[in-house]
């Protein structure tokens, strides 16, 4: 990946997290996978309280990233316990809390670097 592609991927990842936070998602994480996998540059993992909220998060991300002109695939929208949005360079996982704990992607991809998002995520602050 070129630096330009990496920068654009990170920009998309940060935008997805920012939008999810606006929809009250919690515990957002960005995992940088470039050095350890060829499947994608970044995983974005967020949690919502309900299926309705998870769909709202997915809808908001779709609208926000549409301006970049990217095509994506989405799975799990109807049930909304785990919505996966695949934009190739970034893959977004929107979980209900139980599913996030069960699948534990952060542990599965434990070798990935966590991107610091403290500039945009302040838990407990409205």
Image (cartoon, rainbow, N blue to C red):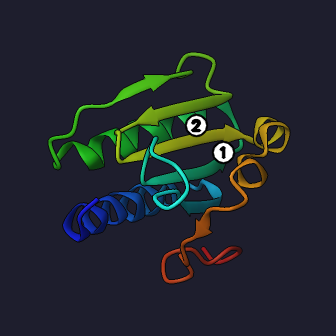
110 or 103, nearer to the observer: 110
Question: Could you tell me which residue is drawn at 46 percent across and 58 percent down?
Answer: 34
Q: Is residue 125 above or below residue 57?
A: below
Instruction: Specify the quadrant that holds the N terminus.
Output: bottom left
35 or 72, nearer to the observer: 35
Asked whether the beta carbons under mark 2 and mark 1 sit within 8 Å of each other, the answer is yes
Question: Could you tell me which residue is drawn at 71 percent across and 46 percent down?
Answer: 105
Which residue appears farthest toward the top when viewing the image?
A: 78
Q: Is residue 78 above or below residue 14?
A: above
Residue position for label 2: 54
Q: Kindly state the secondary structure of the residue where label 2 is placed.
A: helix
Query: How would you rate the neighbour count of disc 2 (Cα within 10 Å): few for under 14, some for 14-19, many for 20 or more?
Result: many
Residue 40 position, x and y percent, is 43, 46
**Snapshot quadrant of residue 4:** bottom left
Residue 61 position, x and y percent, is 38, 45
Residue 122, numbered label:
none
Residue 48, numbered label:
1
Instruction: Specify the quadrant that holds the C terminus.
Output: bottom right
Rounded to the nearest whole Å, what is the CA distance between mark 2 and mark 1? Answer: 5 Å
Counting residues from the start of the chain, the first of labels 2 and 1 encountered is: 1
**Snapshot quadrant of residue 80:** top right
Give the left or right position of residue 2, taking residue 126 as reference: left
């Amino acid at each position: 990946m070129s630096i330009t592609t990496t920068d654009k991927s990170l920009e998309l990842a940060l935008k997805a997290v920012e939008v999810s936070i606006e929809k009250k998602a919690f515990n957002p994480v960005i995992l940088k996978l470039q050095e350890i996998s060829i499947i994608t540059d970044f995983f974005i993992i967020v949690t919502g309280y309900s299926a309705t909220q998870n769909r709202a998060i997915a809808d908001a991300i779709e609208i926000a990233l549409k301006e970049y002109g990217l095509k994506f695939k989405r799975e799990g929208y109807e049930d909304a316990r785990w919505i996966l949005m695949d934009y190739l360079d970034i893959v977004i996982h929107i979980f209900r809390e139980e599913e996030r704990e069960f699948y534990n992607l952060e542990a599965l991809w434990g070798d990935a670097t966590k991107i610091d998002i403290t500039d945009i995520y302040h838990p407990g602050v409205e």
